[in-house]
Image (cartoon, helix red, strand yellow):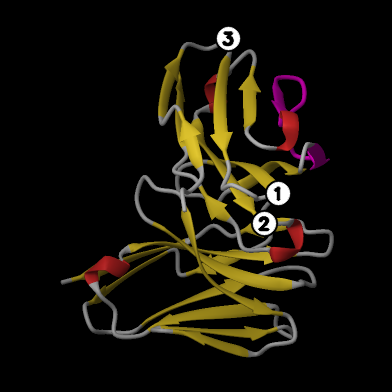
Amino acid sequence: EAGVVQSPRYKIIEKKQPVAFWCNPISGHNTLYWYLQNLGQGPELLIRYENEEAVDDSQLPKDRFSAERLKGVDSTLKIQPAELGDSAVYLCASSPRASSYEQYFGPGTRLTVT
Amino acid sequence: SQQGEEDPQALSIQEGENATMNCSYKTSINNLQWYRQNSGRGLVHLILIRSNEREKHSGRLRVTLDTSKKSSSLLITASRAADTASYFCATALTGNQFYFGTGTSLTVIP
């Protein structure tokens, strides 16, 4: 069974530039999560999807961050414009459904904003 | 802010020794999970313990949960060099909200 796929693995951009991350969850997983992980910290939830619906986006900085999960499969997280403080690892995770709790994580995208 | 706090922040032990790390949390939970993260990788689910359980085992892992103290511990027995990683607890609240702790960095010296 293929795991959660994320791309790119690494991204370096200048501040004020836009950036997008892509995630393809495990086939059949209805729940998809985007997390932000700063160095030496645990993941912090940005947004959770149930199929194509964003059911928890309370921690998503909506002035610059946006996400979509069209057709309830893969998802894209965008930052526009990026700021220096956005440098972090962006993790995507999926689970069969919200009530199953166990999450399967992708390898993450390491973003560096210069 | 994060719900869980792991203790210690870093732990270094010899191969074959046991490793114990603790997690404290702030509010009532539905369940608590432990994850491992190797350097530069995503997190891997290790074990889940529900709020009505007190102890759970999986291979060399033993997890305890004390809801009265709002704390959990993860014990790794007979540690191996391959256990070197960061370990995070994650608390699941009602409404499927998840909060990860700050993590314990474990180094197992061969």
Q: Are marks 2 and 1 in contact (CB under 8 Å)?
A: yes
Q: Could one spot residue A114 in this view of the protein?
A: no
Give the residues in magenta: A53-69
Mark 1 vs mark 3, foreground winner is 1
Quadrant that contains the C terminus of chain A? top left
Task: Find residue A96 and name its label.
Answer: 2
Q: Are marks 1 and 3 in contact (CB under 8 Å)?
A: no
Q: Based on the displayed image, in which of its 4 quarters is residue A97 positioned?
A: bottom right
Q: Which residue is mark 3?
A: A16
Of callouts 2 and 1, the N-terminal one: 1
Q: Is residue A63 magenta?
A: yes
| Type of amino acid at the residue the image marks with label 2 | Pro
At 57% from the left and 21% from the top, the residue drawn is A20
Dot 1 falls on a residue whose secondary structure is: strand
Pointer 3 local density, CA inside 10 Å: few below 14, some 14–19, many at least 20: some
User: Alpha carbon of mark 1 to alpha carbon of mark 3: how far?
Assistant: 31 Å
Task: Find residue B33 and name its label.
Answer: none
Residue B34 at what x, y percent from top left? 54, 69
Residue A33 at what x, y percent from top left? 66, 44
Task: Find residue A31 and name its label.
Answer: 1
Pointer 2 local density, CA inside 10 Å: few below 14, some 14–19, many at least 20: some
B17 or A21: nearer the viewer? A21
